[in-house]
Amino acid sequence: MTSPRTEIKTTTCYMCACRCGIRVHLRDGKLRYIDGNPEHPINRGVICAKGSSGIMKQYSPARLTRPLKRREGAERGAGEFAEIGWDEAFDILEKRLAHIRATDPRKFALFTGRDQMQALTGLFARQFGTPNYAAHGGFCSVNMAAGMIYTIGGSFWEFGGPDLERAKLFVMIGTAEDHHSNPLKIAISEFKRRGGRFVSINPVRTGYSAIADEWVPIRPGTDGALLLAIVHEVIALGLFDRDFLVRYTNAGQLVNLDERSDDYGLLVRDPATPEENPEYAHNQLWWDRHSGQPVRTHSEGADPHLLGTFRLPDGRVVKPAFQLLEERVKPYTPEWAENITGVPAATIRRLAQEMGIVARDEKIELPIAWTDCWGKEHASVTGNPVAFHAMRGLAAHSNGFQTIRALAILMTLLGTIDRPGGFRHKAPFPRAIPPAAKPPRGPEAVKPDTPLGGLALGWPASPEDLFIDSAGEPVRIDKGFSWEYPLSVHGLMHSVITNAVNEDPYRLDTLMIFMANMAWNSTMNSVEVRKMLNARADDGEYKIPFLVVCDTFQSEMTAFADLVLPDTTYLERHDVMSMLDRPISEFDGPVDSVRVPVVPPPAGCKPFQDVLIELAGRLKLPAFTQGDGKRRYRDYPDFILRYETEPGSGIGFLAGWRGTGGEKFMHGEPNPRQWEMYAQNNCVFHHRLPPSYQYMRNWNKGYMEWAQRVRIRRFGDPIILQLYSEVLQKFRLAADGKWGTRRPPERLRARIKTYFDPLPFYYEPLERQATDGTRYPLAAITQRPMAMYHSWDSQNAWLRQIHAHNHLHVNPRTAAAQGIGDGDWIWVESPWGRVRCLAKLSEAVEPGTVWTWNAIGKQPGAWQLAAGANEARKGFLLNHLISDTLRTADGSAISNSDPITGQAGWYDVRVRIYKAGAEEPRETWPQFEALHAYPGMAREVPEEIAYDASGGRK
Ligand code: SF4
């Protein structure tokens, strides 16, 4: 008998979005087990329950294994498919897409879920020429990205985070129970061992909040009020870092307060020193304390007033931005915030003092010399060790952008930006404020057989950057970058189906969805959206005529497809986590990584990246085509090796092992052995910057020069933190008929003037404003469970043993008021619908909130779960209660989204709860027809699957 051949292959996990390094152990080519890779910088060998359960993804009975075409005459949603070959699938797509591209490229829309290939999908869409492209960000946490990036040039998660290695106080706000899973768990555990204090502000005390030293329960959607009250206290007590504010922020810059002028509310420019770079001007003025005169910022020897009112020689009254901030937060007292948030005023005061005192009195000094962008040499790097982490709990509200501005401003006042012990950027951040990439400005950017004239997603700096037509109406199907959602930097995926069906602003032809379950957990208003997917126009054709769904598993969404494309798992394909996209950089420098196949895919499956490369070649999209008209790239691995952002730029998807022999990094000629070199190096490339480039990167001359050299930054100018946002004020001015040439339609004028405030302010989320709080007194929210990544794992045999259904968690006091006991069947009802579910009483939720884990409830038969599985009979989906549309005062419909960014207001719904009748069935409601297996899938799923010791199935 020959001894078994064992192998260990390294790749990158994708059981959640954290990108830990893993080792996959194989015996005779078969998967045996997965563990963490100790050599990987992200997780240093740690693996979580999800990561080690990746093996069960391979054995899921829900695997799609063939391209499928909806059977002639079968209704969408019924899941009636005929098996076809890939040639036929490509022929169908090529014919349809070529016609759309040659006639009206807007009619093709590509929207993707939580994928990690947006640089490729975005390139494909742009080359195709459609404006209708986005990934999941608009319904996830775009407020977090936009609110932070428009203020400090970076954000949390992939863009930056808390430096817990040196922090003394760590404040986490609105973060799910295991967001940023292994890396943050490792960092918190080390932080706590070193004696750091951890405060968690969250309506729910689970996950991270459960191990915090202090849990501060708060009512959902009110974080902005809390943060503004803390800002009030920090300013009132003088606990802000004045030196930091003066040099690195616009706190001292003078704002024009002459209401009659066209640039009212904008920063005053120095007429003597014209703007060197109009895109990012640096000729603002300070009011110098020494000379009593206005001087250009950063003038040698000058020291600006942060408070006061001044009159310029031309008579204009001006105030420093900090003065305006101080005036703004004056009424936001802790007592005012207590009424809104439920957090006692004394607690707010104590937290503000603690933050300010730790920042001021426990300063860190590192012996690292560096030079700032104005040429001043610093002998050391200093830091104020208060670190924050925040995520979707703040973001997924229709007031989230201004809330997150308030957080970024608090972090700035405490002087914690890109300093040791505070917030640290991760390459390619910090970006300019706003980043240079812009969407197109009008419909002329969309032309037949031509790439889109701009990026489908970008960062508007003013109304001039909106993507609108001459009537001021949207060009995109999701209305992104229109006056309705001007800074929708990640698009509005949650509006696509509703808008397309309503032909508002126009009808689509083909909607391609990748890795997003828009018929279930990735949509608001799921019951109605499912009807929309089946809606027909007067001519009998579907309102969305052709639906293409690419996924690895059968789901509620695939059932609605006209064409299903079976994807591969993360263990079967090449992937890149690119510097052009969302890499996995560390605080000390850029990091990118790859996945390489460790097992072959089933014969009928194809990686979506290869599908795009094939389609791009067939459609002859310019970036994918040679001069002689032949396709440029064989497949996705070949594309990754040879693609450059411009011919000869030396910048490609991967930063490591570039140059013909792999001797260069960040930029260099394509290297034919680059995949091999990544595979030999744990699938990760990590470039450590010299210590003098690792901090203060917004203003660090050496770092800026390096970043320009490697083309992470276009300009080398300092990135000044924006306590006061001129970008927002320009939109307000436009609504007042001033600044620029573009004006919002009359119906949106008041909306722009209200929400585009250059200083943060608190308002109730829009849905809450429109809901009768007496009838619906409770906030209802979701979070993902620690053992599953959203909905990805309810078909995972091991992880289903941890959760197979969810409960509605209710505070015992709230439950008692309704006569509800632990384990009772109850109704949870919003203005939009009701759901029957099981109640779980828990002190770990504030009394005004009920919550559940998202996406465990399933349609019967989805993912090949037995029709009677707990996921379908006891598990429930809160999305049935959340509307994607709200009514404005004049009765018109508007998306349930943040009016600035278009972020979906997932957590704004209000509900009431009551006991289900004794005679009612003991199962969840609504119920749906059972899905069944498609061709190529396992027809019958055994009750039990056993594996022998060698990994073979018995
Ligand atoms: S944290 Fe996420 S990426 Fe890391 S091992 Fe767990 S599932 Fe995989």
Image (cartoon, rainbow, N blue to C red):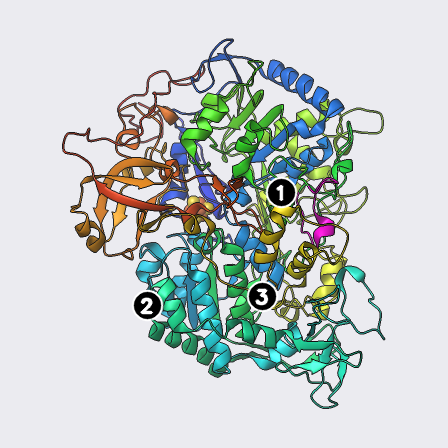
Q: Is residue 420 above or below residue 736?
A: below
Q: Is residue 354 above or below residue 626?
A: below
For marks 2 and 3 on the same chain, the one whose residue lies earlier in the sequence? 2
Which of the pair 585/597 is nearer the observer?
Answer: 585
Numbered label attached to residue 213: 2
Residue 932 in which image quadrant: top left
Q: Are marks 1 and 2 in contact (CB under 8 Å)?
A: no
Q: Residue furthest left?
A: 918
Q: Is residue 664 above or below residue 120?
A: below
**Would residue 105 appear left or right of 681 to someone viewing this image?**
right
Amino acid, disc 1: Gly
**Mark 2 crowdedness (10 Å alpha carbons): few <14, some 14-19, many ≥20:** some
Q: Which residue is mark 1?
A: 480
Residue 415 in which image quadrant: bottom right
The N terminus sits in image quarter: top left
**Mark 3 crowdedness (10 Å alpha carbons): few <14, some 14-19, many ≥20:** many
